[in-house]
Image: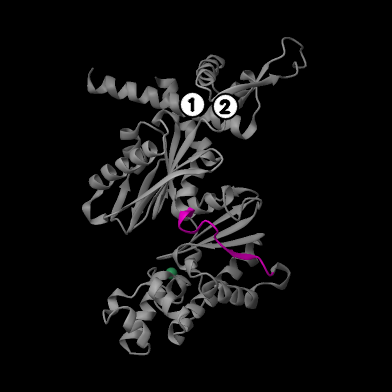
Amino acid sequence: MSVTKRQQAADLTMVKRANTSLIANTLRTQGPLSKAQLSRITNLTKSTVSSIVNELIAQGIVREAGIGSAGSTGGRRPVMLELNEHAFYVVGLDIGTTAIHAIVTNLTGVVLNEKRILSLPRDGLHSLIHRTVQLIQATVQESGVEMQAILGVGVAAAGLVDHQQGLIRFSPNFGWRNVPLGSLLQEVLNVPVWVDNCTRVMARGEMWFGSGKDVSNLLYVNVGYGIGSALVIDGELLGRDSEMGHVTVQDDGPLCGCGKHGCVEAISSGSAIEARAREAAVQQHSTLLLELCQGDVTAISGEMVASAAEAGDLVSQKIISEAGEYLGRAIAAVVNAYNPELVIVGGGVSQAGKLFLEPVRRGFQKHVMPDFYAENKIVGSRLGTRGGVLGGAGLVLGKGSELDVDLFFEQDERA
Ligand SMILES: [Zn+2]
């Protein structure tokens, strides 16, 4: 077989798997449905639907769920189909600067297995792809699931991401520009892969599995190395990149990476908190911080600042509390503009818990319009460090994937 032929065969398998994924997702979200209804909703031909459905029934993935009512024109009453939610699985992947985290979940979000490896960004793209593929295969294999039963892989990645093409436009932490991460993984795994920006993916995770489950308007704030945000309006994740991190909260405040002064990211992000703590340690304002970093000020991490604050270090407490209050002020600005029902604060810094969230709530209350204030409007993420991977799984399960699956149909027609 020539390379091209082999490539075409791989494409065909992929088209089929993407169509299978679409049918399964449609049945999961809108089922029970008849074959005719499936064909109408998915825009696939009746024969394609029929052949895929028959295969899925034989595999126990789809089952018959009784007889539907006849249409207005009469005729034979159709067999209704539903998805056996325990026969399909998805992979969620979170590619962070320090670690790559993979999970396998069933369609109801139950985690079967998870594994982590170091990202080692300095080893380059080729090594990262190779190790990521091995990680996914091992995570799937150990969960006792066949690769055939994987509907797709959803990836959370930092940086500017073109989610329709699975392309990383720019990732400063990995030094990537225009890296087609989705297709690189897809080529080796032979499973559809969806990629989106990590903050948007985490917001999706909250909508699927977390605090945002029953909420249709929410603001998700990711406080990690930087500050990202995602807005969900009427159940839909807004498609654009938003830069809540650059809301000005302090005139003539510290210089931000964007070139302006006093952005909330320059005060409340993990990197800003670390920078302030290092400065305080150099000036010997905190003996506990110096002790925790064993004299190496450059080693001071956000976790160290949180532990020092918890142990009663006043300097660390002040740094976290100011960071929180300013973030609360920035959140108030967004809430005043869009009035979401709920604000979820996630990301590494949110792991500090109450220590960080209470000042956030204080700053929020101080600056939000009274009508938009509610005592429990701001909550911490319940998904913790799993926000990215669970969101990745949600990317495969969720509405966002339907749009992208359409891209495969174009291939289907050409094939
Ligand atoms: Zn800025």
What crowding class fits label 2: few (fewer than 14 Cα within 10 Å), some (14-19), or many (20 or more)? some
Where disc 1 sits, the SS reads: helix
Q: Position of residue 111 (x, y in %)?
A: 49, 44
Specify how the rendered protein is coloured: one colour
Q: Which residue is mark 1?
A: 19
- Type of amino acid at the residue the image marks with label 1: Asn
Quarter of the figure that contains the C terminus: top left
**Quadrant hosting residue 32:** top right
Labelled disc at residue 42: 2
Check the image and report above or below for 345 versus 9: below
In the image, residue 182 lies at what x, y percent? 37, 40
Can residue 9 be seen from the camera position used here? yes
341 to 147, vertically: above or below: below
Indicate the amino acid at tag 2.
Thr
* Bounds of the magenta segment: 375-387
- Secondary structure of residue under mark 2: helix
Residue 380 located within the stretch drawn in magenta: yes
> In front here: 357 or 395?
357
In the image, 311 versus 405, the foreground residue is 311
